[in-house]
Image (cartoon, rainbow, N blue to C red):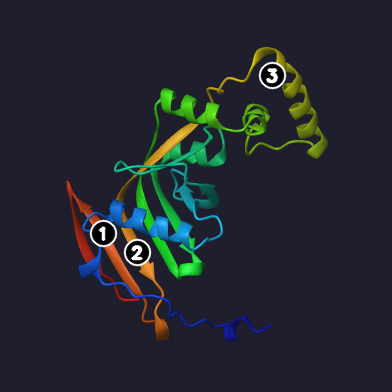
Amino acid sequence: MDLADIRKDYRLKSMDENQMSHNPLQQFELWLNEAFYAKANEPTAMVLATATSKGIPSSRIVLLKAFSERGFGFFTNYSSRKGEEIEANQQVALLFHWPELERQVRIEGLATRTSKAVSDEYFNSRPYESRLSAVISNQSQVVPDREYLELLWAGQQDQSFAQGINRPSYWGGYVVEPHSIEFWQGRPNRLHDRILFSREGENWLISRLAP
C-alpha cells in the first residue's frame, strides 16, 4: 500500500459563515444533532489533548457527557494521566470528527472540575458495572496483569453488594469552557471550509481561515 496515493474528495456539504449561528455553541449543537441523525459512529467521541506544565502533549478519546452554554463536559479519574496534566495545565483541546458528514470541530479552552454534586449525579446514573470499574481502577498506573484487575473487580463486586457503590473522591467531571471553536467542512479540491469563532469578552469574532 502506497500511503501517498490514498485520496478522498469531499463533496457532501458546504459551509457559509453568513448562514451559521452567531453563537458557536448553538452551531455545535446543530452539528451534533446532525451527526446523530446521520448515525455517525460514536458521535459524542472526542479527542482530548492535554499537556504537562513543560508543554509535553498527550491525547486520547473520551466521550462528551454534558453540554451547555458553559461548555463541554466529560468525566474521568482525577489521578489519571489526563487528570494530573489538567491540574498542572488547564489549557486543553478537543476534537470531534464525523467522517460520515465530512466534518470536524476543533475546540480550545480551559478545563475546570465540576461540582461534587454534578459528579455524584452522573456517577450514580452510570451502569453498575461501570461504577465498579471506576472504583477499582487506579487509572494510568502500572498493574501486574489482566488477572489482577479481574480479581479486584470481583472483590469489589462482593463488597458493593453489601455496602453499595459511592463515587470515589478521585473520580469526577470536568467542563471545558471554550475560547475558540473551529468548524471544518470538507470540500472538493482540498478547498475546505474553515470557520473560526474566537471569544472576545462576552462576544464571538467570526473568521474564515484558508484551508
Q: Residue at x 41, y 48 (%)?
A: 92
Question: Can you see residue 145?
Answer: no
Q: In the rendered image, which quarter contains the C terminus?
A: bottom left
At label 2, counting other C-alpha atoms closer than 10 Å, the crowd grade (few under 14, some 14-19, many 20 or more) is many
Percent from the top left, x then y, of residue 7?
54, 83
Which badge, 2 or 1, comes first in the chain's sequence? 2
Q: Are marks 2 and 1 in contact (CB under 8 Å)?
A: yes
The furthest residue to the right: 147
Residue 2 drawn above or below residue 179: below
Please tell me the numbered disc located at residue 153.
none
* Element marked by disc 3: helix
Q: What residue does disc 1 label?
A: 197
Front-most of 181 and 130?
A: 130
At label 3, counting other C-alpha atoms closer than 10 Å, the crowd grade (few under 14, some 14-19, many 20 or more) is some
Identify residue type, mark 1.
Phe
Q: What residue does disc 2 label?
A: 183
Residue 39 drawn above or below residue 145: below
* Element marked by disc 2: strand
Which badge, 3 or 1, comes first in the chain's sequence? 3
